[in-house]
Image: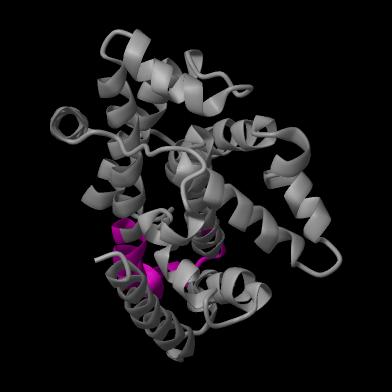
């Protein structure tokens, strides 16, 4: 069993807050008219802007703490690599990261403002570029062209449930969450929701001026220089494979150096894309 550090506890707490506030937002969300319903949540639902912001910021906190927890878990590799159960748990942790990215990304698409529409179209285009199985992945994850946002909505809800299952029952065998950690995270999320509005912009905005979610900026910049398959599919797979391979490498640190090199290049790409709008 992998050790659950403070960052792991905070990630679970943030996920709980995100899912709880997500129930309230989802109850008033209409997949047939996504942008109008996103705006109506704030206009009609009591404290609707607060609930949207709470859901948004708790989701961001979950992903950030999950990254920190994953990085700290690398220090436990000598113990993890010696046990079959430890390696199995490491695979689960490795898969949790891309699942979390897909879940948060689909949340951006679901609001279907200018950023959401552009992000959804780009993601569908990237999936269709996968040889042989691209249509299958698109039908499972996006299918925006044929089915609107119904598939995206289903994936968002389903993957959120999978994240909760992986991060609690399977990953820890029990919910390890102290009251101080949970309420501290809850108070922090409430403060962020009160002080900072959840982003939303106009639909059909000029795509050339749109920047995607913060974790998507590096891919967006790389798409300017490389074909979609290499920039949007193969390049993001590098850290997932390198991270997953760490327990099997023993003293060989090749995957770790690949992972660190990827992080440096991705931060550089993200900064370059961000500076375009400055």
Which residue sits at x=64%, y=22%?
32
Q: Tell me, yes or no, if residue 152 can be seen here.
A: yes
Location of residue 200 in the rendering, given as x and y in whole percent from the top left corner: 36, 37
- 253 with respect to 103 (left or right): left
Q: Depth check: 86 or 190 in front? A: 190
Q: Residue 176, how many percent across, how many down? A: 32, 36
Left or right: where does residue 209 sit relative to residue 30? left
Q: Is residue 67 left or right of residue 197?
A: right
Q: Which residue sits at x=29%, y=8%?
A: 46
Count of numbered tags: 0
Instruction: Look at the image and name its color scheme.
Output: one colour
Q: Position of residue 127 (x, y in %)?
A: 70, 59
Say if the magenta span includes residue 82.
yes
Q: Which residues are magenta?
A: 68-85
Task: Locate residue 75, reporting x and y percent.
Answer: 30, 71
Task: Name the main secondary structure of what is drawn in magenta.
Answer: helix
Give the residue displayed 63% in from the left and 69% down from the top: 233
Q: Which residue occupies the extreme right position in the image?
A: 132
Quadrant of res 185: top left
Q: Front-most of 67 and 132?
A: 132
Q: Is residue 236 above or below residue 212?
A: below
Q: Nearer the viewer, residue 106 or 273?
A: 273
Compared with residue 234, is residue 162 higher up or lower down, i.e. above or below? above
- Residue 125 lies in quadrant: bottom right
- Residue 25 in magenta stretch: no
């Amino acid at each position: 069993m992998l050790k659950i550090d403070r960052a792991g506890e905070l990630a679970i707490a943030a996920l709980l807050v995100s899912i709880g506030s997500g129930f309230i937002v989802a109850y008033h969300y209409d997949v047939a008219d996504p942008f109008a319903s996103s705006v109506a949540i704030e206009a009609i639902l009591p404290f609707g802007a607060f609930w949207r912001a709470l859901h948004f910021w708790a989701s961001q906190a979950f992903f950030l703490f999950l990254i920190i927890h994953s990085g700290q878990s690398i220090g436990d590799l000598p113990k993890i690599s010696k046990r079959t159960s430890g390696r199995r748990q490491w695979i689960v942790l490795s898969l949790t990261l891309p699942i979390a990215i897909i879940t948060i990304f689909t949340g951006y698409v679901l609001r279907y403002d200018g950023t959401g529409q552009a992000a959804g179209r780009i993601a569908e285009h990237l999936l269709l570029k996968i040889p042989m199985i691209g249509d299958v992945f698109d039908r499972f994850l996006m299918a925006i062209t044929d089915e609107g946002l119904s598939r995206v909505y289903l994936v968002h809800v389903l993957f959120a449930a999978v994240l909760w299952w992986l991060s609690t029952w399977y990953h820890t065998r029990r919910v390890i969450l102290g009251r101080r950690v949970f309420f501290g995270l809850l108070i922090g999320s409430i403060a962020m929701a009160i002080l900072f509005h959840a982003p939303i912009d106009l639909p059909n905005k000029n795509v050339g001026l749109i920047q995607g979610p913060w974790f998507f900026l590096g891919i967006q910049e790389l798409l300017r220089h490389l074909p979609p398959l290499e920039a949007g599919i193969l390049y993001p797979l590098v850290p997932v494979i390198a991270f997953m391979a760490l327990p099997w490498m023993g003293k060989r640190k090749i995957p770790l150096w690949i992972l660190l090199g990827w992080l440096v290049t991705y931060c550089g790409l993200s900064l370059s894309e961000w500076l375009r709008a400055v």
